[in-house]
Image: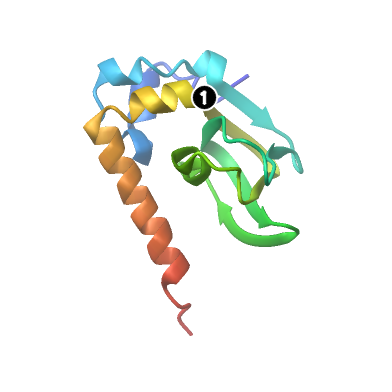
Amino acid sequence: MSTLLNGSRDVQATLSSLPLFRSVSPRVLTLIQPEQMTKVYSDGDVIFREGTAPDSLVVILQGTVGVLAGERLIASRGATEIVGEGALIENTPRWASTVAQGTVEALVLPRGVVEQLLADPIVLRNLLGILARKLREATTPPTS
């Protein structure tokens, strides 16, 4: 059971605070049913497994998720970030696994809901901004 969304008096305000849903209309946000889409993962739980078909996108509400290529940790994602968008957009098998690092609360958005959300230009713009930031992080050399 969700502690962040189901316990919130104003679910739409909480959703609107997430980067993917910033400035999105309340009408579009009604596509998201937190009581049915929120899941809590325990430390070590696999959220996605590398090579599987993409059926959802995950918004991390609380906690940290490790992104692994094989056994190698290639990224960590925390609260308000998304995982699983690349394979879902490309409709290709997942190229990495994601594993809960500690307790993780997440909003698991099924493919059908994601497709409906992406019909909204604001959601689409927000997703493009998130992807641009991830690309910049992946291609910017670390500072000394």
Q: Dot 1 corresponds to which residue?
A: 110
Q: Position of residue 141 (x, y in %)?
A: 45, 78
Q: Position of residue 114 (x, y in %)?
A: 42, 28
Between 19 and 62, the residue placed more toward the observer is 19
Instruction: Give the quarter of the figure containing the N terminus.
Output: top right
Between 85 and 12, the residue placed more toward the observer is 85
The answer to whether residue 23 of the structure is visible from this angle is no
Instruction: Give the secondary structure at mark 1.
Output: strand
Q: In the image, 10: left or right of 35?
A: left
The quadrant holding residue 126 is top left
How packed mark 1 is, by other alpha carbons closer than 10 Å (few <14, some 14-19, many 20 or more), is some
Q: Residue at x 48, y 77 (%)?
A: 142
Q: Position of residue 4 (x, y in %)?
A: 52, 26
Between 6 and 27, the residue placed more toward the observer is 27
Q: Residue at x 38, y 65 (%)?
A: 136
The answer to whether residue 8 of the structure is visible from this angle is yes
